[in-house]
Image (cartoon, rainbow, N blue to C red):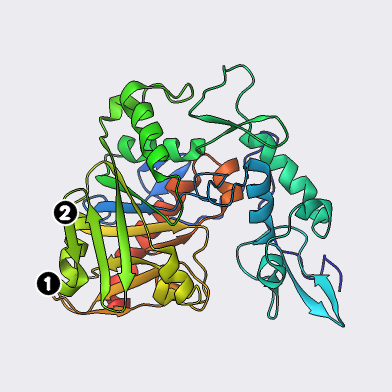
Amino acid sequence: MSGSENSCEMPQSSKNGYHTNSGCETDTGTERAGGVALSNLPSVKKKKIVIHFDLNNTILVSDAVTKQGTVAALEYYLSTVTWGRMAKGRWEWMCETPTLLPPCEGAVTYYSHFGRVPGFTSGPGKRFRKVLEEHLELLQWPSHLQPDKELSIKGEDGKLYHWILPSFFQLLQDLASQGLEFSIVFRTFGTDLPRVLLVVQRALEQGTHPLFPDLPALKLSVNVTAGRIRCSNKGAVLTYGEERLSARDGERSLYQFMSSSQGLSGFQDHFDWWAQNTYSILGGKPLWIDPFDSAVQHIFIDDNIQQNDEDTIVHPKVFLDPEGSQTRTASTSELYDLCLVQNDLFRAISDPSYFIQRIHICMENYERNLQQGLN
């Protein structure tokens, strides 16, 4: 089977490295940021959006837990978005370029079949070596800037890279410039959270990022206290400094706590619970959603969000009634691009407006569809 017959279509890159096709469709509106229109739907701009952000392979291309540097982390991610199948005892590629979704029925990612493979693009994934090299180049810390001990990181190849994707800081500027009320909640299984909070705080309060020196003008606060979310058969328990909230007292209180978040904050979620639930939706990071709440929309961005509830990382818990405390588990496909965004790391690296594009799509889809689809 040739690659041309089953290629995974991906936007072509322009000479500056940015994809020329955003892959986003939004209605024409009067406001634009990064070339993306925000519709004039009456309630879109009036609501607050709470954006839950994964860290590793979403805004960080490294991992303290697995001790992966930038090159290894990006190479690992590449193995999760390239597809094939076993045929007559041999692996057969079914795509020529990476894609989030399977190119055809029966295709599985290389990672899902073989697990982590060090040096993926030097061996079985060598056909994707150019993709890796192109995005590593885009991720490099600008040569005309001095290295920064917090914002830049040395890769295994000796080169300097951005530790936090510039597109994340661009999102903060885009949201503020559009007058949207928002908060950011980092949600990670890993151990990078305390450091991320401190580095982001300095960038936002002291203007330490050389590419975004005007961030302090946004007046965004950062709470550097890392919270915890722990789950069990009795429900979730959220700990944040001196505060402790439990689902046993009603999940509504957890929703209200998240909805009232201000500025930037973060929580370490419960990896062991996800593993105990065989990495399925039921063990994922809990996300409380109230389809009756016209004032707040929650959006979760994570590279491990999959439209396969047996293998996904966020557990959407949707309230059944206005002001009620009972929730149901919603499938990922039900909330895909409404409240759940499967992060495309390559586009987050190559397109500065990627995150605001995804937020716009979720806001408009939510406004049009969520009430009818979930009530």
Residue at the image point whose x is 79% and y is 57% from the top: 125
Residue 133 coordinates in the image, percent (x, y): 74, 41
Badge 2 marks a residue whose secondary structure is strand
Task: Name the image quarter holding residue 140.
Answer: top right
Q: Is residue 360 above or below residue 2?
A: above
Q: Residue 254, how many percent across, how many down?
A: 20, 63
Q: Quadrant of the C terminus?
A: bottom left
Please indicate, yes or no, whether residue 184 appears anywhere in the rendered image: yes
Q: Which of pointers 2 and 1 lies earlier in the amino acid sequence?
A: 2
Q: CA distance from mark 2 to mark 1?
A: 22 Å
Camera-near label (2 vs 1) is 2
Q: Nearer the viewer, residue 250 or 5?
A: 250
Count neighbours of disc 1 (C-alpha within 10 A) and say few if under 14, some if 14 to 19, many if 20 or more: few
Marker disc for residue 146: none
In the rendered image, which quarter is residue 330 located in?
A: bottom left
Please determine whether, in this image, residue 310 is positioned above or below residue 154: below
The circle drawn on residue 323 is 1
- Residue 240 position, x and y percent, is 23, 51
For this rendering, which residue is in front, 369 or 226? 226
Expressed as whole percent of the image width and height from the top left, the position of residue 76 reads: 66, 54
Image point (27%, 44%), residue name: 180
- Going by the numbered disc 1, the residue's amino acid type is Glu
Q: Secondary structure at mark 1?
A: loop
Q: Amino acid at mark 2?
A: Glu
**Residue 336 seen in render:** no
Residue that numbered label 2 is attached to: 243
Residue at image x 55%, y 47%?
A: 63
**For mark 2, does the 10 Å Cα neighbourhood hold few (<14), some (14 to 19), or many (20 or more) residues?**
few
Quadrant of image for the N terminus? bottom right
Q: Is residue 230 above or below residue 62?
A: below
Query: At 44% from the left edge and 70% from the top edge, which residue is drawn?
Result: 274
